[in-house]
Amino acid sequence: MFLLLACSPAFSADQASKSTFLSGIHKKNQISCADCHGKSLAVNDSETALNKNCVECHGTLEKLASKSKEHINPHNSHLGEVNCTTCHKGHGPSKAYCNYCHSFGMKIPAMGSAEQSNDKKWTQETSQKKSKKEKMKTESADVVVIGAGGAGYVASITAHDAGAKVILLEKMPITGGNSMLAAGGINAAATRFQKARSIQDDPAEMVKETMKGGREKNDPELVKVLAYRSSDAVDFLASLGADMTDLVRSGGVHADRTHRPVGGAAVGPHLVKVYRENAAKRKIDVRVNSEVVKILSDNNGTVTGVQVKGKHSGLYTIKAKAVIDTAGGFAANNELVGFYKPQFKETASSNQPGATGEGVVLAEKIGAKVIDMEQIQIHPTMGGETKVLISETVRGSGAILVNHAGKRFVNELTTRDKASAAIFEQPDKSAFLILGEDIRKSNVQIDGYIVLGLVQESDSIEGLASKMGVPAAALAATVDSYNKAFDAKNDPEFKRQDIPRKIAGPKYYSIWVKPGRHHTMGGVKINTEAQVISTKGTPVVGLYAAGEVTGGVHGWNRLGGNAITDTVVFGRIAGANAAKFIKQHTVKKP
Ligand SMILES: Cc1cc2nc3c(=O)[nH]c(=O)nc-3n(C[C@H](O)[C@H](O)[C@H](O)COP(=O)(O)OP(=O)(O)OC[C@H]3O[C@@H](n4cnc5c(N)ncnc54)[C@H](O)[C@@H]3O)c2cc1C
């Protein structure tokens, strides 16, 4: 889908030459439209040609990263190969995309920060021109996938490999969704990586613990699929090139089951990079800035495609025999959260700004049954007043939680709902994570929190207590008692099952944490074949769903590490079944 730009001949040459629609360095240097857009002056929603020209002029992300001495360098961050236009605009001031979720005091070079954005005006004018001139276009594919997070990529890759022509649509300017923010890891039982470390685990245990964590409100059939196919899921990721070799324990689990890249690196950015590379290698049609606004169906309720609103192309239709809804959860949607759980409205959210729940609404409109929407998970440890999630693996690596009196108050490895409830009962409804040098070294993510300014450190417990504003003697006694529990392999007070490391110097660290909304357990009802179930109890023909957009897998409380498993296990099932459905319903030409 292409659209001619504002500086096409129809547009005033005078305006173009005066760079009316440009800003920053492009305006200063009097860049012409063709310099960025090429001779055809066409732009598609993914801004492909535009970005190619950005790289030709300014260099690759790698080259730009090597020029910068900044400690936090967006060109070298966990974004991987993403569009330059995700952050930079020729027609308005740039904005670091990562600041939607993080808060970096990052200045974008060569941009006038006070400049008024022309981007909106430009986009509006170009789309108005289009809507007057053109009637809605129609494309076709075998399978359309809504939302390019983990589940969307996995479903797309699987459907493609089974022979389907796939279009993967993402409404944000960047793919990855919440999946890209996942820090801890992916749970899987009885994997070859666990066996290599002599870790005893069993899918039956994973079923039991997932059900217990979900307060037995999960759909047991979905949980069985999750657990018994989890080892396969990790092998699938490894086959795509992911590193799943490191293991740690998450809350509510008896074994080291959470798989992550070596050194404890964050799992999400790694996986999304692997997914992007695999989708590119397969030439899957991935489109950003492309929001699905409607799932189309015929009179029988059978899915026939989607309607898309492209940033540049406006409204258009993609006909498809199968649609896979992988549009994620809604924890970033204040209104929807407030509707289902008024007490959580206005609480901080750890989610990316696109996690607003349209996937549920779109499916509901064509008859899908929606369940457990009021089950919204509060994560116990978000960094103070920020949107940065402090991964559960920090506790899994040995950190303790203390209150403002310097005392432990909960088993740190209990489930998220219980840990959050315990923090809410503390004065100031906040707490501190306390850790020592070994724990820091075991988890590379903690270095990231240090860079973000979320960590206080000291050479002594007393020094740390003074920085935190808690009684030094109480904190020292708490740490001493925890270290004794490590030696005795027994935590009499809180019954913590696993204490992998002592809290010991030379340096001690604390992170101020508050609970924040994190995961939406409810969503579209599916069966074990990832088919969306209608309010009548039968599958909506041609509609599949996977990942956070669905309800039932996690019950009323998700265990840390189980969401990525959900995206991979059910993403694969959805992709394979959608491709199978296409084959069954494609009439072969004689
Ligand atoms: C900070 C953080 C850390 C986490 N850490 C972990 C962890 O360590 N382990 C774990 O198991 N889980 C973790 N989770 C949870 C897990 O990351 C998510 O539940 C999971 O990644 C969801 O994947 P998904 O593919 O279903 O959705 P997403 O990855 O959110 O992808 C959905 C995509 O759909 C797009 N979209 C939405 N509506 C539309 C539309 N109408 N048209 C087109 N596109 C649309 C969204 O923009 C988004 O990109 C974490 C979550 C967060 C926020």
Image (tube, rainbow, N blue to C red):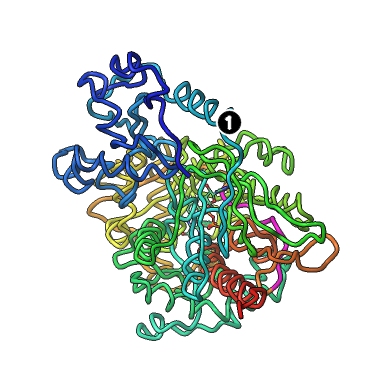
Q: Position of residue 355 (x, y in %)?
A: 56, 45
Specify the segment rendered in magenta: 518-527
Q: Residue at x 67, y 71 (%)?
A: 211
- In this view, the residue in front, 73 or 249, is 73
Quarter of the image for residue 183 reads bottom left
Residue flagged by tag 1: what amino acid is it? Ser
Task: Name the magenta segment's main secondary structure.
Answer: strand
Task: From the image, tell me which residue sits under label 1.
Answer: 131
Task: Give the answer, above or below, for where 485 lies relative to 116.
Answer: below
Residue 265 in magenta stretch: no
Query: Quadrant where the C terminus lies?
Result: bottom right
Q: Residue at x 57, y 54 (%)?
A: 146
Quarter of the image for residue 244 reads bottom left
Whether residue 199 is visible, yes or no, is yes
Residue 521 in magenta stretch: yes
Q: Is residue 524 left or right of residue 103?
A: right
- In this view, the residue in front, 317 or 144, is 317
Q: Residue at x 55, y 56 (%)?
A: 410
- In this view, the residue in front, 474 or 257, is 257
- In this view, the residue in front, 210 or 508, is 210
Q: Number of callouts in the render?
A: 1
Q: Position of residue 38 (x, y in %)?
A: 29, 37
Q: Secondary structure at mark 1?
A: helix
Q: Residue at x 53, y 66 (%)?
A: 155
